[in-house]
């Protein structure tokens, strides 16, 4: 089976995020109010072939641990969706 | 009401993604098989105060158009979740 995975790599709570702070500071001058707590991270999409969803999730978790994140300062949120053969084209 | 928004900024289909290609090329050497179509983007989380979900979504869409994305090469996927007063602390 094929799955589409979306991995959100985000900074752990308490880790400084200068890029998010810069966005947040710029907003009032652009006329945006009521927006706070801006945090930036990476979004990585990939397609995984695995026997079932649990196996696909394990593989993506392993990939996050070893390669996509720095576990000292980042964590990952993984969401998986089955891909139909039509969507794979 | 407060909402937590997750904005996924991704490259439009057909736009080259050298970072994603580099990840994909590195995977077999690390022992990962069955992973393809790696695409990288940005994940931005923010909290929005608005009267209702439609208003919050409009504000975040406007923000994406004007500030968070380059509409020539990127598009944005927005997901919104209501935040309870407890989670806001």
Image (tube, coloured by chain):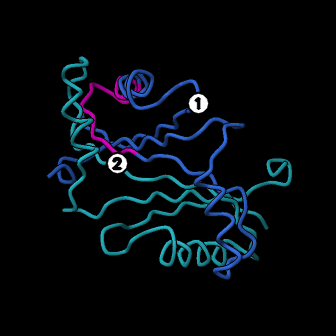
Chain colours: A cyan, B blue
Horizontal side, residue A44 vs residue A46: left or right = left
2 vs 1, front mark: 1
The residue drawn where x is 38% and y is 44% is B44
Horizontal arrangement in the rendering, residue B76 relative to residue A1 (left or right)? left
Q: Quadrant of residue B61?
A: top left
Q: Position of residue B37 (x, y in %)?
A: 71, 56
The residue pinned by badge 2 equals A40
**Secondary structure of residue under mark 1:** loop
**Residue A73, horizontal then vertical, whole percent:** 30, 69
Q: Chain of mark 1?
A: B
Is B64 located above or below residue A65 in the figure? above
x and y percent of residue B70 in the render?
Answer: 49, 28
Say if the magenta span includes residue B50.
yes
Q: Quadrant of residue B66?
A: top left
| Residue ranking furthest to the top | A31
Name the spot of residue B5 as percent of width and height, x first. 37, 41
- Assign a secondary structure to mark 2: strand
Residue ID at (50%, 71%): A64
Q: Which residue extends farthest bottom?
A: B31
- At horizontal 50% and vertical 67% (from top left) the residue drawn is A68
Span of residues in magenta: B44-57
Neighbour tally class for label 2: few under 14, some 14-19, many 20 plus, Cα within 10 Å = many
Mark 2 vs mark 1: same chain? no
Indicate yes or no whether the magenta region holds residue B40.
no
Residue that carries the numbered disc 1 in the rendered image: B73
Q: Quadrant of the N terminus of chain A?
A: bottom right
């Amino acid at each position: 089976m094929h799955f589409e995975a979306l991995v959100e790599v985000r900074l752990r709570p308490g880790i400084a995020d200068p890029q998010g702070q810069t966005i947040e500071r710029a907003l009032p001058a652009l006329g945006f109010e009521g927006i706070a707590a801006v945090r930036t991270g990476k979004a990585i999409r990939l397609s995984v072939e695995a026997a079932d969803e649990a196996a696909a999730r394990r593989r993506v978790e392993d990939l996050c641990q070893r390669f996509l994140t720095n576990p000292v300062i980042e964590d990952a949120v993984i969401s998986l969706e089955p891909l139909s053969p039509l969507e794979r084209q």
